[in-house]
Image (tube, rainbow, N blue to C red):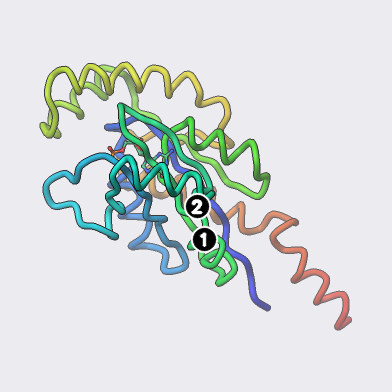
Amino acid sequence: MSKRGMLVILSGPSGSGKGTIVRQLLNERDDTVLSVSATTRPPRRGEKEGVHYYFKTRQEFEKLIRQNAFLEYAEYNGNYYGTPEEPIRRLIDEGKNVILEIEVQGAEMVMDHRSDLVSIFITIPSLGELERRLRERDTESEQAIEKRLDIAKRELSRAFRYDYIVLNDDVSLAVERIQTILRAEEMRYSRMENYILEVVKNA
Ligand code: 5GP
């Protein structure tokens, strides 16, 4: 019996360790993929077109908005970020779980329009810890770090919109917590209904 994949939103402040968590999760699950977003932000060192993001000009991005190409999009820290819709539909039909690693405004846009979602907010032990992580990363100016901290405070205040909160005090533990959520979600009646109907039909 073919099963449809799950659409999984993963949000959390910049510096919460989302990226590392997602990489480890993808290593552990071959039925799960990460959606590649489009953005107008310039590439960081080592980032590749089509792997980390599809890098667009503002003009190109706005054209895609007009063409309804995005499941959601948002402006974050002065740049556009958006999730291309078509690949997601295809992957879910193929039975893959698709992870959207997106910020809260865009996440809320998806939550407002779809109910078949699993939404997870990754949090850090404290804002002091977040500041330390952002400085350790050392890819941005002081001003940019201050701005990200400010955004983080606003993002934390939207955590109540999510189904689950996962604390990232340790990456492996955080991944295990997410695995627990996904394993339980796979057994929801709505996702198992076809199996049950098939069993009843053949009884
Ligand atoms: P960064 O510039 O650090 O790669 O990403 C900044 C923020 O944008 C992160 O919180 C990241 O999760 C979010 N983001 C990445 N892609 C998307 C997207 O397609 N849509 C939305 N709404 N946010 C995104």
Residue 180 in view: no
From mark 1 to mark 2, how far is it between C-alphas?
7 Å
Confirm or reject: label 1 Cβ below 8 Å from ligand 1.
no
Say whether residue 192 is left or right of residue 130. Answer: right
Q: What's the residue at 34%, 42% (across, down)?
A: 59
Up-down: is 4 above or below 146?
below
Which quadrant holds the C terminus? bottom right
Q: What's the residue at 32%, 44% (across, down)?
A: 39
Say whether residue 196 is left or right of residue 6. Answer: right
Up-down: is 119 above or below 30?
above
Confirm or reject: label 2 Cβ below 8 Å from ligand 1.
no
Which quadrant holds the N terminus? bottom right
Question: Which tag is nearer the camera, tag 1 or tag 2?
Answer: 2
Residue 143 in view: yes
Which residue lies under the disc numbered 2? 69
Amino acid carrying label 1: it is Glu
Q: Are marks 1 and 2 in contact (CB under 8 Å)?
A: yes
In the rendered structure, find residue 86 and report the number of the disc placed on it.
Answer: 1
Neighbours of disc 2 within 10 Å: few (<14), some (14-19), many (20+) = some
